[in-house]
Image (spheres, rainbow, N blue to C red):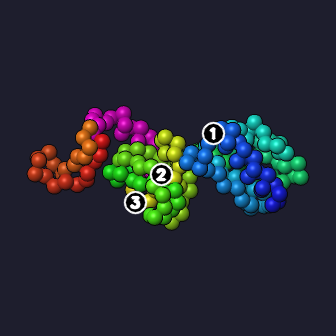
Amino acid sequence: MKDTLQAIIEALCAKERELGLDNRSSWFSAEPADGGSLGVELSRPELLAAVENGLPGFSIVGSAPGLVEMRSASGETALFHLSGSGVDTVLWTVASVADIRREPDHSSELLSQAIMGETMTALERRGDWFRVRMEDDYHGWVRSWHVAETPKAEVERYRSEAGACVGASVGYVRSGPEEDSIPVSDVTA
C-alpha cells in the first residue's frame, strides 16, 4: 500500500504542475482509509478531471459527481473525492476582514484576506480553523469565528436582493438610521 500511496502522491504532484497549480491554489491529502483502500481528498475540480483522464498504473472502477474510484495494477483501491462537493453550504465571511493564513496558526504567513460577504468552500476543519478555497481559488486557513456556515441558497438570495455596496475605505453599520446610533459593526470597501 505504501508504494501505491507514493505513486498517487507523485502522479497528483505532476498533474498539479501540468495545470500550473501550487500550494496557494491547490491542496490534496492521500492516506489509508477503512477496508484497506486509500482515501484521496482533492480541492480542485481540474485535478479531479485530470484523475478521471487517467493516472499511470491505475484504471477507473467507477465515478459520480465529485468522486472517482480507481484500482491499481496490484489490486488496491483508491477513492478520489472533491472536497466541498455535494455540500449545500459555504463559509460566509461575517467579520469586516478575515485573515487567510498558510497554516492554522496566528503566527503563520498571511496569504490573503476575505472581506465581509465573501464566501469560501470549507475543505477541512481543525479545531477553530477551517482550510478553505476562496472565490479566487486561493487556499488557506481561516479562524472559525470570522465565518458562518450558511446555505448557498441564502447567500444567493442575499446577493440578489442587496441594494448597496460599500464604496468607502471604512464605514459603520449602526443600530438605527440616526447618525448618533450605536455602531454595531465596521465594514470595508
Instruction: Choose the circle earlier in sequence order: 1 or 2.
Output: 1
Quick check: 145 left or right of 105? left
Q: Quadrant of the C terminus?
A: top left
| Quarter assignment of residue 29 | bottom right
Residue that mark 3 sits on: 145
Depth order, front residue of 125/154: 125
Q: At 41% from the left edge and 38% from the top edge, which residue is drawn?
A: 156
* Element class at badge 2: strand
Can residue 165 be seen in this snapshot?
A: yes
Q: Which one is closest to the eye, mark 3 or mark 2?
A: 2
Q: Label 2 sits on what residue type?
A: Leu
Q: Which one is closest to the eye, mark 1 or mark 3?
A: 1
Instruction: Choose the circle earlier in sequence order: 3 or 2.
Output: 2
Residue that mark 1 sits on: 20
x%, y% of residue 40? 70, 52
Q: Which residues are magenta?
A: 147-166
x%, y% of residue 88? 51, 45
Q: Label 3 sits on what residue type?
A: Trp
x%, y% of residue 84? 57, 48
Quick check: 12 left or right of 56? left
**Cα gap from disc 3 to disc 2, whole angstroms:** 18 Å
Mark 3 surroundings: few (<14), some (14-19) or many (≥20) residues within 10 A: few
Mark 2 surroundings: few (<14), some (14-19) or many (≥20) residues within 10 A: some
Residue that mark 2 sits on: 111
x%, y% of residue 77? 80, 52
Q: Label 1 sits on what residue type?
A: Gly
* Element class at badge 1: loop
* Element class at badge 3: helix
Depth order, front residue of 83/13: 13
